[in-house]
Image: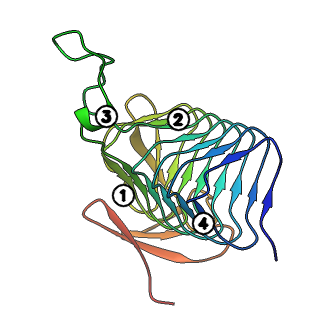
Amino acid sequence: MTVRIVDSADVAGSATIGDGSSIWHLAQVREDAVLGESCIVGRGAYVGTGVHMGDNCKLQNYALVYEPAVLEDGVFVGPAVVFTNDHYPRSVSPDGTIKRGDDWEAVGVTCRTGASIGARAVCVAPVTIGRWAMVAAGSVVVKDVPDFALVAGVPARRIRWVGRAGVPLVDAGNGEWTCPETGDRYIEQDETLTEAAQ
């Protein structure tokens, strides 16, 4: 495998790009960013300074992943998604001087393994999107999302459970849930979902 970086992409020399990854037209990957193997960075997407991405991640067109975001393996970030990184954004300080990079404390979004973020969603840092969770398109995430949760709305709230396949689970009763696509079973306890022993 090889790395594919199209001519119109802007990739910093200090960025690390994993084998088999592709960076498409007008995308920007900043200094010290780390992309794992077989990642895709779509047209016009932005990967901030020092962002870490695992293997097999997909950033769709015009996704904005600001530092210090961390994406574990297999994360999907839909078109025009925004990950914020500032508690109190201002262009200037109270005295009117322009703020510089060291005038504020960056906070990040963390996406755990297999998480998916739908188109035009906004994740307001600091927030963690759990393993195999799914954020519906257009949602605004302001608090942590549990593993396997499907959240939607403004602000985002859990509306369903989903399995690894991303399909809503079926209530099998007694706190058990089943994936209609794979047959995998899950156990719900105290608003937490875990995979049942196979």
Q: Quadrant of residue 16?
A: bottom right
**Residue identifier under label 4:** 74
Please report the residue visible at 44 percent of the width from the left and 82 percent of the height from the top: 196
Separation (CA) of disc 3 from disc 2: 17 Å
Q: Secondary structure at mark 2?
A: loop
Q: Quadrant of residue 94?
A: top left
Determine whether label 3 and label 1 are within 8 Å by CB.
Answer: no
**Residue identifier under label 1:** 146
**Residue identifier under label 2:** 121
Q: Secondary structure at mark 4?
A: loop
Looking at the picture, which amino acid does disc 4 mark?
Gly
Q: Position of residue 130 (x, y in %)?
A: 41, 60
* Mark 4 residue crowding within 10 angstroms, few (<14) / some (14–19) / many (20+): many
Please report the residue visible at 29 percent of the width from the left and 59 percent of the height from the top: 191
Q: Secondary structure at mark 1?
A: loop
Separation (CA) of disc 3 from disc 1: 22 Å
Determine whether label 3 and label 2 are within 8 Å by CB.
Answer: no
Task: Name the colouring of the figure.
Answer: rainbow
Please report the residue visible at 62 percent of the width from the left and 58 percent of the height from the top: 167
Q: Position of residue 134 (x, y in %)?
A: 52, 52
Looking at the rendered structure, which numbered label has been put on residue 168?
A: none
Q: Earlier in the sequence, mark 1 or mark 4?
A: 4
Looking at the rendered structure, which numbered label has been put on residue 86?
A: 3
Separation (CA) of disc 4 from disc 3: 26 Å
